[in-house]
Amino acid sequence: MTDIAIIGAGAWGTALSMVAARKGGHRVRLWAFEEEVCESIRARRVNERFLSGLTMPEGVGVTRDLGEAVAGADMVVSVMPSHHCRGVFRGLAPHLRREMLFVSATKGIEEDSLLRMTEVVATTIESVSGFRPRIAALSGPSFAREVARGDPTAITVASEDAEVAQAVQIALSDPRLRIYTNDDVIGVELGGSLKNVIAIAAGVCDGLGLGHNSAAALITRGLAEMTRLVVACGGRSETMAGLAGLGDLVLTCTGGLSRNRSVGEQLGKGNKLADIIEGMHGMVAEGVPTTNAAVGLAKRHKVEMPITERMWEVLHEGKPPAEAMHELMTRSVKSESGARV
């Protein structure tokens, strides 16, 4: 039996708690920041705010108390928005134990530090609690609603410690969620984060009324610039051909449940970013802050990322989306391998 704490009761955290509970043999506790979420789950076994219409197993307990959430836990799964990660783990740190396993399921990069989420978790725990945690990153093509209702899904878990990756794989895999292990933590985390930026651009194409040719070109060249940055940061190019790269990129750029694609579509239709965010009613599109971090990492490593740079200008400088797309198409011609012709 594994005691699993899920920290964050948004759609993905709720879905993972349902996965852990349906596996059987686990004690599962879900930490929610919002009192309304706790009340909804306790009273009706539904997270009506973030994952309505899907009944949660009775085996999932819910609490707003961080200490209660992780008391006795063998595995702590972090599923909060990236900009809350450091603060939540500062609150968690006094309640954590060295023997716990940690999993980051957040697809984002910290804006100020440009750290990946496993780095944020590890450095925060080490600075407050005095030990270096054993940690993994969980990523891949996975809409929370589809995972929660049991649609067949394949994702990946990455850790530098093979035993940690295998423990997560065993704890969460079942006939409806297949988890592969990987040791390229950098590639898996950056792939899961950067694809959200490209998904915003794919949404812009839809909002502008562009066709399938445009989307295919954007996804393919988006993967190329994601791969350049991953390799520059120490990850492997082959990871970008797998679930955490190409798989997640295709899903997020084409799927109707993608919040990042939806943001881009609304931008392409002429709506303002502030109005779009307000209309999401607390849901988070990680690609918006990740665009800042991705541009920062690209500058640090001297990597060319034209799609990401144009999306940053659309999001943060008010560049018209049609102008951004025109600039991408009128860049100097090149070989597909990258050499200028």
Image: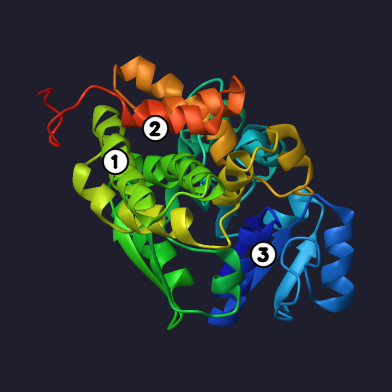
Query: For the residues marked 2 and 1, what is the alpha-carbon distance in whole angstroms?
Result: 8 Å
Q: Amino acid at mark 1?
A: Arg
Query: For the residues marked 3 and 1, what is the alpha-carbon distance in whole angstroms?
Result: 33 Å
**Mark 3, residue position:** 14
Image mark for residue 251: none
Q: Nearer the viewer, residue 163 or 251?
A: 251
Image mark for residue 221: 1
Q: Nearer the viewer, residue 169 or 69?
A: 169
Which residue is pictured at 70% across the width and 78% down the height?
Answer: 59
Classify the position of the N terminus by image quarter.
Answer: bottom right
Q: Amino acid at mark 3?
A: Thr
Which residue is pictured at 43% across the width and 47% down the height?
Answer: 192
Q: Position of residue 68 (x, y in %)?
A: 77, 55
Is residue 42 in sight in this rendering?
yes
Instruction: State which mark lies toward you, 3 or 1.
Output: 1
Query: For the residues marked 2 and 3, what is the alpha-carbon distance in whole angstroms?
Result: 32 Å
How many numbered discs, if any?
3
Q: Amino acid at mark 2?
A: Ile
Q: Position of residue 232 (x, y in %)?
A: 25, 27
Q: Nearer the viewer, residue 49 or 186?
A: 49
Mark 2 or 3, nearer chain start: 3
Residue contact between numbered discs 2 and 1, judged by CB atoms under 8 Å: yes
Q: Assess disc 3: are there few (<14), some (14-19) or many (≥20) residues with their C-alpha within 10 Å of its C-alpha.
A: many
Image position of 155 with respect to 124: above or below? below
Q: How is the image coloured?
A: rainbow
Q: Assess disc 1: are there few (<14), some (14-19) or many (≥20) residues with their C-alpha within 10 Å of its C-alpha.
A: some
**Mark 2, residue position:** 307
